[in-house]
Image: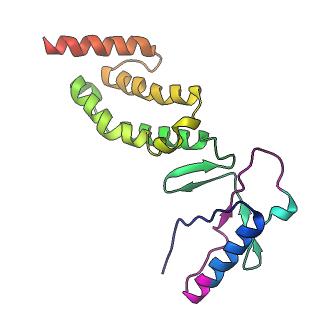
Amino acid sequence: MYADDMALVSETIPDLQNAIDLLSIWAQTSEIKINEEKTELVIFRKGGKIAESEKIKCKGKHLQRANHFKYLGLTIQRTGKSFRIHIRSRMVAAVRAMNDFKDMKLIALGTATQLFRLMVVPTLTYGMELIWKHLTRKQLLELEKMKARYLKRVLGLSQKTRSRLVYELAKKKRSSSRT
């Protein structure tokens, strides 16, 4: 039997160590193996070094410390309020989704806009309802740039074209296709 994506959370190191110990006992009686090599420890804090007393063991082995982890598709960093890595991974996934569309210049702007809304936006915004209040202005602007990047491809423009111009061209093209 395999179990995956489990997270244990505690406010104190002793309580977390106790939870790990109880999990180990349960896993052993349930004939489930915990892979200590893949099990990681993230200590949420504002900064500073991790003390020797903050080490956690599983079956006698110290768990590896990590600066972030991915849980159910959301990358959580050790400050608990920085989501830079999650934003970057969502943007990479959105670019991959955009690359799935071939010959974008041949598709009508309205159709391309619907494709963006249906295929790219959900990929780009996965998990945002949980973290949006922690995003910086810079991160929000980076997310917004993805739409301009997409429109540049649809309109056959250089990636160096200013976003404001791209939106104006898209607006003109949309209104001229209605008449």
Residue 100 x %, y %: 34, 41
Q: Could you tell whether 15 is left or right of 77 in the image?
A: right
Can residue 107 be seen from the camera position used here? no
> Which residue is at a point 70% across and 78% down the rendered structure image?
21
Q: Could you tell whether 50 is left or right of 124 in the image?
A: right
The residue at the far right in this view is 52
> Of helix, strand and loop, which mostly describes the magenta segment?
loop
Magenta span contains residue 148: no
Classify 162 as above or below 72. Answer: above
> Which residue is at a point 51% across and 69% down the rendered structure image?
4
Q: Could you tell whether 156 is left or right of 39 in the image?
A: left
- Quick one: quadrant of the C terminus? top left
- Count all numbered tags in the image, as a single digit: 0
Residue 166 x %, y %: 38, 15
Classify 41 as above or below 162. Answer: below
Classify 9 as above or below 73. Answer: below
Can residue 73 be seen from the camera position used here? yes
Q: How is the image coloured?
A: rainbow
> Closest to the observer: 43 or 119?
43
Magenta-tinted stretch = 26-50
Q: Quadrant of residue 113?
A: top left
Residue 48 x %, y %: 83, 47
> Which residue is at a point 71% across and 60% down the rendered structure image?
11
Magenta span contains residue 43: yes
> Closest to the observer: 86 or 137?
137
> Which residue is at a point 44% across and 44% down the rendered structure image?
126
Residue 86 x %, y %: 55, 44
